[in-house]
Image: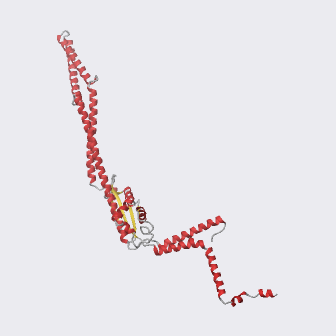
Amino acid sequence: MLDDQHRSIPLAPLMRIGGETPLLLSEELSQWQSVRRWLAQRFWPLVLVVLPALLSILYFGFIESDRYVSEAKFVVRAPSTAALGQIANVLQGSGIVKSADDAYVVHGYLESRDALLELSKNSGLEEMFGRPEADILSRYPKFYRKANVEDLYKHYLKFVYLDYNQTTGISLLRVQAFRPKDAHDLAAAMLDNAEVLINRLNERAQQDAIENAIKEIDFSKERALAAQAKVTEFRTRESLIDPNLTSKSMLEAITKLSVEIAQSSAQAIEIGKAAPQSPQLATIRTRIASLQEEVQKQRQMLGGNSGALAPKIAEYDRLMLETEFATHGFLTAMATLESARQDARKQKIFLDRVAEPSMPDIPTYPYRLLSIAIVSVLAYLLYRIGALLVKDTLGHSVK
């Protein structure tokens, strides 16, 4: 009974005998344990969701530097070579059309390492990217790496944007920088370098056209001279200036002899009817036989044996045809050279600035609230996906 009475004695009065400190300590320990349990139950949400959100607020809200954007528009044009109707001529105006291929060439250059090196050499690109206004993650070079071309090139591509409108043929250039004037100057320098590229392409195309025309002239000239030399060699070998003229004279002689034969034959027939025993008849017949022999001889000289004139005429005509082709090629090459020289005085490709680089007065980037929201949502989604995977794998949910 005594033990039961002792057991029934409440503990609170006993603790109060020693004072208030043990009670407060017990309550604090209990609260700390509750906090620890709460933290343990929510460790992963805090690490995977809350911490990224806080870091994004810290960086995007207070650390990331402002970036200004300068925008410019340009179009690359080339002279029209197609035949256009009257309406098309009126609509097109100057006869100059947009050139998508040349525009892509300009885009490729502006996004190349050559353009980067040119800007770095003459426009202070590295200094612009290393301004004191830039935050530690946006500045070049990075605090943990030395300056090098590859990192500068990657940094450059992040700050430059190019787009081509297929409908209008207008290219859009956007350049970011940490100062408004830097963005404007960098965009202007890029357009200047693009114009230098266009001029260089024009000069190279013109020079190539002239050089090719000169080479064609030299080739056709040698060909014409070689053909003329073959004609001269033929004339020397055959002792003939023009076999065609010789054959023409021989044909005229054969025609003349044939006429004489016909006249003599008619005369012989008349005499034979009038005086068959006339001594003139034998003389006329002898003359006819001589004329016929001469005609046969002339015909043999034209085409009756290996030394006849016909094969020589064929060879001569072939040589003259080669000479004519070579001469025509030479004249065509001369005309091509003259045309190339005239074209060299004309511009083949143009870069027209539709809108000059703008001078920004307020920063365009970063989108601070949007960036914070995106990071927070992505962190939460990744956490929920991970929780589902763990639940499916271990058989319990992660809260």
Q: Residue furthest top?
A: 277
Q: Quadrant of residue 114?
A: bottom left
The residue under the point 22% across, 16% down is 289
Q: Quadrant of residue 350?
A: bottom left
Residue 346 lies, with reference to residue 378, above or below; the image says above
The residue under the point 59% across, 68% down is 384
- Quadrant of the drawing holding the C terminus: bottom right
The residue under the point 19% across, 9% down is 277
Along the line of sight, the residue nearer the viewer: 88 or 27? 27
Residue 186 lies, with reference to residue 300, above or below; the image says below
Left or right of residue 92, residue 61 in this image? right
Along the line of sight, the residue nearer the viewer: 93 or 152? 152
Q: Is there any visible trace of residue 35 in the rendered image?
A: yes
Can you give x and y, in whole percent of width and height, for residue 367 in the image?
A: 46, 71
Q: How is the image coloured?
A: secondary structure
Left or right of residue 39, residue 217 in this image? left
- Quadrant of the drawing holding the N terminus: bottom right
Q: Is there any visible trace of residue 190 in the rendered image?
A: no
Can you give x and y, in whole percent of width and height, for residue 7 in the image?
A: 77, 86
Can you give x and y, in whole percent of width and height, for residue 379 in the image?
A: 55, 69
Left or right of residue 149, residue 295 in this image? left
Marks counted in the figure total: 0
Can you give x and y, in whole percent of width and height, for residue 135 in the image?
A: 43, 72
Residue 337 lies, with reference to residue 349, above or below; the image says above
Q: Residue furthest right?
A: 1
Residue 77 lies, with reference to residue 278, above or below; the image says below
Q: Residue furthest left?
A: 279
